[in-house]
Amino acid sequence: MTDKNETTQTKRKIVLPADAQLDRLIHDPSSEILVAVAADQRLTEDLALALLNRRDLPGEVLQELNRNTSVARLQKVRLAVAAHPRTPRHVSLPLLRALRTFELMHLALLPALAADVKRAAEEVLITKLASVSSGERLSLAKQASGRIAAALLTHKEERILQAALLNPRMTEAHIVKALKAEAGTELLAPAVARHQKWLPRMEVKAALLGNRHTPFARVVQIAAELPLRALKDVLHNARLAPNVKGYLREVLAKRAGGGIS
């Protein structure tokens, strides 16, 4: 009968000899050997990155690599550890704070990375937006994930706002949420109100109708296009300017009386 204590004992760590060929050992199938390689102070940046190219690394190897003072503070190694799909959360999440703007953008777009890690990378990057340059914000608006681009929808630079609207990962839900929040939408509402891609969307039209920064001429157009149910919903749930509220009441009365739905 197997002693229960055997299964709970900590595995004895292997210490590699002085003549160990690390460039060969990084390909070893043994997890114990890989842990020893990851902990070895002779490990270089190139060897660490080559090791991190293995998608089959056990979590303890990645954890040991993150503890190795000879490579753990190197930026490329930090990024590769954070980006590895098998890195334990207690290792990857703290690393995000040490990553740069476009490294965080890269992580947020990695298909193989866990959703919670990608979301955490987005959150860290969003907190940095105010401190990055205008050029960097423009690049993020064009290339970043939809959630990061959405954080730039209320930017005060027209070119950045427009780039965010054109981001291929931007969604209708992001735009509707920004319009309904209303804060900082002085430029956004007019931009969406003339946007060929987003204006035709029914939910976007309703959100524009409820936004006080939407030009009145566009309010008139949208009110004529939305069904009665959507108009009633905006009238009852949105904080409307008095002139818009009055106009929508007139439209509803006329259309309801004419039997138009």
Image (cartoon, helix red, strand yellow):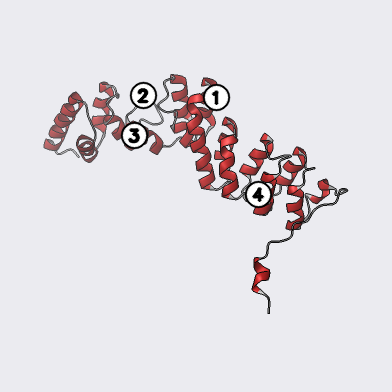
Q: Is residue 14 above or below residue 151?
A: below
- Measure the C-alpha gap from mark 2 to mark 4: 51 Å
Task: Determine which residue is flagged by label 2.
Answer: 194
Q: Which mark is residue 136?
A: 1
- Amino acid carrying label 1: it is Glu
Residue 109 in sight in this render: no
Looking at the image, which is closer to me, 90 or 140?
90
1 vs 3, front mark: 1
Outermost residue, right side = 19
| Picture coordinates of residue 147, whole percent (x, y) | 46, 36
Q: Is residue 28 left or right of residue 86?
A: right
- Measure the C-alpha gap from mark 1 to mark 4: 32 Å
Task: Determine which residue is flagged by label 3.
Answer: 204
Residue density around tag 3, few if under 14, some if 14–19, many if 20 or more, within 10 Å: many
Residue density around tag 2, few if under 14, some if 14–19, many if 20 or more, within 10 Å: few
Residue at the spot 32% in from the left edge and 37% down from the top edge: 203
Q: Earlier in the sequence, mark 1 or mark 2?
A: 1
Task: Determine which residue is flagged by label 4.
Answer: 63
Residue 6 in sight in this render: yes
- Amino acid carrying label 2: it is Arg
Q: Is residue 31 left or right of residue 258?
A: right
- Amino acid carrying label 4: it is Gln
| Pointers 3 and 2 in contact (C-beta within 8 Å) | no
- Amino acid carrying label 3: it is Val
| Picture coordinates of residue 119, whole percent (x, y) | 50, 42
Quadrant of the drawing holding the C terminus: top left
